[in-house]
Amino acid sequence: MTSLTDTYFDNVIERLAALKTALAPGMQRAAEAIIAAARSDHRIYVFGTGHSHVLAEEVHYRAGGLAITVPILSSTTMLHEGAVASTVYERTEGIVRPIFARYGIKPGDVLFVISNSGVNAAPIEAAKVGREIGATVIAITSVAYSTASAKGRTRLADLADIVLDNGAPPGDAVLDVPGSDLKVGPVSTAIGVTIMNAILAEVAAKLSADGDAPIYLSANMPGAKEINEKLVERYRPRNPHL
């Protein structure tokens, strides 16, 4: 009998294999937008609420990651200071604009908005604010989930310049629990992180060919201290989390 451990691995691998092809054009467009922004000394901002904020932390000060990335982090929309309250806040209109005011997003920057369900007030407002500013808005979302949940509401997928559909089902969990109607095994985070890192790897390769790829080294690697200190000094003025 196949275990749920094996089934989950197989499910995620199959999804990633399919998305590698399906998302190739969109990921290429995203990479090109980021490369153009980086070459003009712009920044790449990443915003998500609830578990989607994990993608913002994933790219922040990351070994093998780009220093041009800036996470947008606000405790009210995250989980660690109150998961129940954060669910209320992410569905409350008007909270994103004051959060974004801290970051100084500019025309020509790139803004990733991550929302699996794609219909909550906060990511919708984030996409709208990003467009008002003149940033390129890239969404990582489940089109199937947002379509099922929208019920006449605007979806994140309706607002973004580039939509990367993570292919997650409504509800996110993909495995049936034997003997019940429950499901486990959410996939949106594993898929979203893979999409994000794949795009940034492509960006890093192109910037390296230009001779300027601002890539962090793991703190335990030789020369990391000197390289990372220079990157922090250069990019700290527009990243309040460095």
Image (cartoon, rainbow, N blue to C red):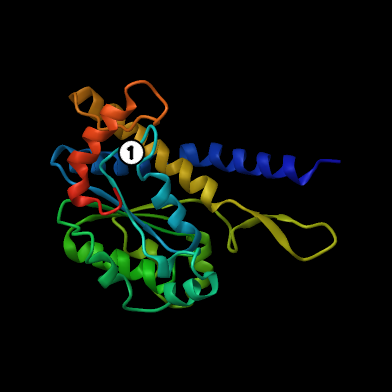
Give the residue furthest to the top. 222
Percent position (x, y) of residue 20?
A: 48, 37
Residue 141 visible, this orientation: no
Of 179 and 240, the residue lying toward us: 240
Q: Which residue lies under the disc numbered 1? A: 28
Residue at 31% of width from left, 66% of height from top? 126
On the image, the x and y values in percent for residue 197 come to 41, 39
Q: Is residue 197 above or below residue 149?
A: above
Q: Is residue 35 above or below residue 158?
A: above
**Residue at point 23%, 59% (across, down):** 103
Q: Classify 155 as above or below 238.
A: below
Quarter of image, res 182: bottom right
User: Visible in this render: residue 93?
Assistant: yes
x, y percentage for residue 204?
30, 31
Q: What element carries label 1?
A: helix
The answer to whether residue 92 is left or right of residue 214 is: right
Image point 68% across, 45% down: which residue?
8
